[in-house]
Image (cartoon, rainbow, N blue to C red):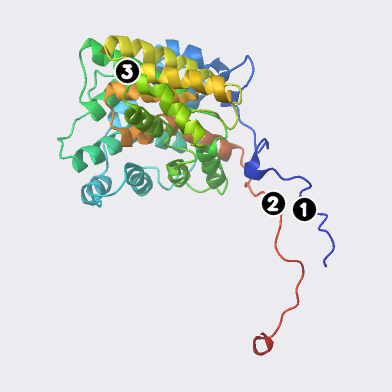
Amino acid sequence: MSTADTTRPSTYSPGLDGVLAGETNLCHVDEGEGGLRYLGYAVGDLAEKARFEEVAYLLLFGKLPTQKELKDFTTQLAAHSVLPGPVEAFLGMAPPAARPMDMLRTSVSLLGMTDPDASDSSHNANVRKAIRLLAQIPLIIATAHRLANGKPRVEPQADLSFAENLLLFLTDRRGDETAKAMAHVLDASLTLYAEHEFNASTFSARVTASTMTDLHSAITAAIGTLKGPLHGGANEAVATMFLEIKSRDKAKRWVQAALASKQRITGFGHRVLKNGDSRSAIMQQHAESLSRICGESRWYEIATIIDRVMQQEKGLYPNLDFYTAVAYLLMGIPRELYTPVFVCSRITGWCAHVIEQQDHNRLIRPRALYTGPTMREYVPLDRRR
């Protein structure tokens, strides 16, 4: 037997649960009264009072924009709302069965080769890349979806906000009062999804960025991480659950039967937020309001019944994905695009983390707890039995 390795870490936390793996000034996830804050600003205030473009600017530049700065920022987004030829060509020739997240991941990798700052990884160049990605990702999602479904392209409209253009791309809705209400709720969801500290995809981006590779490589890694069902896709799964239940009359029996059979109810619980997600309450209010405006209360009623049963029987609270699914169903966003829509928002947080990591870089290289065989002697090939 070999002697114990005294150099190895003395503690081990599966999944790095509770481990402090780095520092950030971008986001504070507080389970107490502080709630979720982006650079000190309460996310509820931002979702209620700011446009998503302001939040994107805050994460990328560290401050809320003035009117002129916001105008210049939105002008830049509009100017970059175009896809390079190689990306357009890829979207046109991708396999018909390709999933939206696969299309998005590979397109972002292609963007890394065509970006004007491809050979420059300085702070300012990374900010420019981030702005281009924020403008280009909605176009990738919309172009891929429309090509796959035989729909004509829709060009971004200069008089529409980021959320209004995104709603137009995905649902063809614009202009009327209902579309404006939908865009308002979509804008709030983008703000709420924009950043959440060291979640799996963000940490993946930071690990990749810590090698001092380019920003697009780090974002490609983040998208690949988000594709995994243990991290992304929760709001899509919640919407699928609502569609399976179909009516409020079946909701209570359905969830009780699911619990009795040990089935996991998607949209509840959070790895960090054990006592509830403050973002969920914000989105619940928006989902209720949008249900009234649309004259369709079915999904919201199903959601509240499931919410009540889960709190009573399991002591679990809904996370942000739960009531977001209600809102996205009302908007008519295709379910397979829910996770790509998340990317439209979280690209701001990912890019901000990549920039922060490389501005104060140290290669992320943790240790592993070895559980293999103890020391063994090599046996020559001809003597092995």
Which residue lies under the disc numbered 1? 8
Mark 2: few/some/many CA within 10 Å (<14, 14-19, 20+): few
Residue 66 visible in the shown view = no
| Residue at the image point whose x is 55% and y is 23% from the top | 313
Mark 1: few/some/many CA within 10 Å (<14, 14-19, 20+): few
Mark 3: few/some/many CA within 10 Å (<14, 14-19, 20+): some
Can you give x and y, in whole percent of width and height, for residue 250 in the image? Answer: 37, 23
Badge 1 amino acid:
Arg
Query: Looking at the image, is 262 positioned above or below residue 323?
Result: below
Mark 2 residue element: loop
Q: Whole-Å distance between the Cαs marked 2 and 1? A: 7 Å
| Residue at the image point whose x is 50% and y is 36% from the top | 123
Can you give x and y, in whole percent of width and height, for residue 138 in the image? Answer: 31, 33
| Residue at the image point whose x is 15% and y is 36% from the top | 151
Specify whether 225 is left or right of 248.
right
Looking at the image, the residue that sits furthest to the right is 3
Specify whether 111 is left or right of 224.
left
Q: Which numbered disc covers residue 298?
A: 3
Which residue lies under the disc numbered 2? 367
Badge 3 amino acid:
Arg
Q: Whole-Å distance between the Cαs marked 3 and 2? A: 50 Å
Specify whether 1 is left or right of 81.
right
Residue 267 versus residue 138: which sits nearer the camera? 267
Given this view, does label 1 or label 3 mark the residue nearer the observer? 3
Badge 2 amino acid:
Arg
Mark 3 residue element: helix
Query: Mark 1 or mark 2, which is nearer the start of the sequence?
Result: 1
Query: Looking at the image, is 60 positioned above or below residue 146?
Result: above
> Quadrant location of residue 377?
bottom right
